[in-house]
Amino acid sequence: MLVFEAKLEGNDEQYQKLDGSIRTARFIRNSCIRYWMDNRGVGKNEISAYTAILAQQFEFADRLNSMARQASGERAWSAISRYDNCKKKRPGKKGFPRFKKEQTHGSVEYKTTGWKLSEDRRSITFTDGFKAGTFKMWGTRDLHFYQLKQFKRVRVVRRADGYYCQFCINSERLEKREPTGKTIGLDVGLTHFYTDSDGTTVENPRHLRKSEKKLKRLQRQLSRTKKGSKNRVKARNKLARKHLKVSRQRKDFAVKAARCVVLSKDLVAYEDLVVRNMVKNHHLAKSISDAAWTQFREWVEYFGRVFGVATVAVPPHRTSQKCSNCGEIVKKTLSTRTHICPHCFHIQGRDHNAARNILEIGLRTVGHTGTLIASGDIDLCSGEPLRCGEQCGLGLCPRGATAEGSPR
């Protein structure tokens, strides 16, 4: 599934109508969650049917496209499902469903109806009861390459700097690349964004830290305004725009760094970090969040699927303590930045030593559950996909099973 985004250009009256559809979608989602709270045990079908009842009860809800109402019900059920993950102890996002509040951002999602593209694919018309009209689209993606039946969802997103239209297209992105015969292990950090097994380091951009001075000034200006005033709305928008710029800088860096790593190697090994637990350390939480390790990992895995590169997530335990030269454990604190082995007298940077250990574990455990390849796990020797129970040329089963398919 591909997602293309374009900015919408219209007049103030059209923007207000889009706001109305976004508020209605949020109202339907919140109403479905309230319905589930009052009637525990209802399922997804009951939630979907309740969206039609809301359209009968409220005139403004009936103005929203029927499929958009169903999509809002699906969002409510997604929040409810996360609560079921807590009780059933299943992996994934967890937490009791919460109501959405009025914010500077929001979205409404259409399926196959409620919108219409122009013949030149440069403008879009929303045809539901709110009658927002035709908007000109500004973007770099050419939508002519895809048929209309491939457009599965159209999402209107409101951000601090305007309104955007996202197209969810049912298509798979696969690109070819020349094999390099090289492998790499990555150790992320705060001093350097990452250090690889070759000793190369990439500096941590620290986008939030660099913008913190201006963010504090904008926050003070917002706190001095009167609640409910127009000046407060303007100050809040300025602050939101600055936060939006920081998030875009962070994403741009993660995309470019991940693409560069994947294109230059045939196997990428990285730590399987649980960042949500690491940010519980309040001394490092801001710096860890600013580094955006999870976003970088997601893009590495994505480009691995696109270019057919093996990406392996390895357990991070003892990767910094183990000597990459002799294998002995050398305990050290977080402040110790140089690895000095008393057994083999090997001296190396702490992060460089950890990156070599990560690569070694990745080569030994190709096919870890964190590996994301478009066609599944692959044989590093032949490049062909492996099924559970099969062994590659190195004698490794991708899912820890014997040739008969039984767990080891």
Image: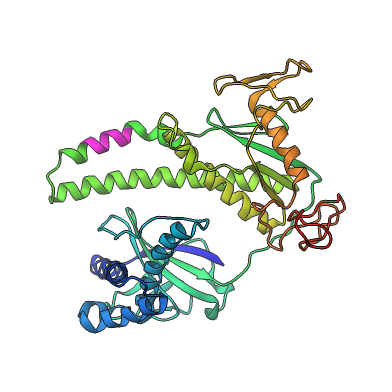
Q: Is residue 31 left or right of residue 336?
A: left
Which quarter of the figure has residue 203?
top right
Residue 202 sits above or below residue 275 on the image: above
| Residue 80 against residue 368 in the figure, above or below | below
The residue shown at (32%, 70%) is: 36
> Residue 181: which quarter of the image?
top right
Q: Please state if 110 lies on the left or on the right of 4 as rendered.
A: left
- Residue 251 location, x and y as percent? 49, 47
- In the rendered image, residue 401 lying in the magenta stretch gets the answer no
393 with respect to 192 (left or right): right
Magenta segment boundaries in residue numbering: 214-220
Q: Position of residue 252 (x, y in %)?
A: 51, 46
**In the foreground, 203 or 70:** 70
Q: Position of residue 194 (x, y in %)?
A: 60, 35
Tell me how the rendering is colored.
rainbow
Q: Nearer the viewer, residue 117 or 214?
A: 214
Question: Residue at 69% of width from left, 43% of height from top?
Answer: 269
Number of numbered markers? 0
Task: Please tell me whether residue 219 belongs to the stretch shown in magenta.
Answer: yes
Quarter occupied by residue 20 = bottom left
Q: Residue at x 70, y 48 (%)?
A: 263
| Figure check: 163 above or below 183 | below
Quadrant in which the N terminus appears:
bottom right
- Residue drawn at (44%, 76%) of the image: 111
Q: Please name whichever residue, 388 or 376, is drawn nearer the observer in this view of the structure.
A: 388
Q: Which residue extends farthest bottom?
A: 56
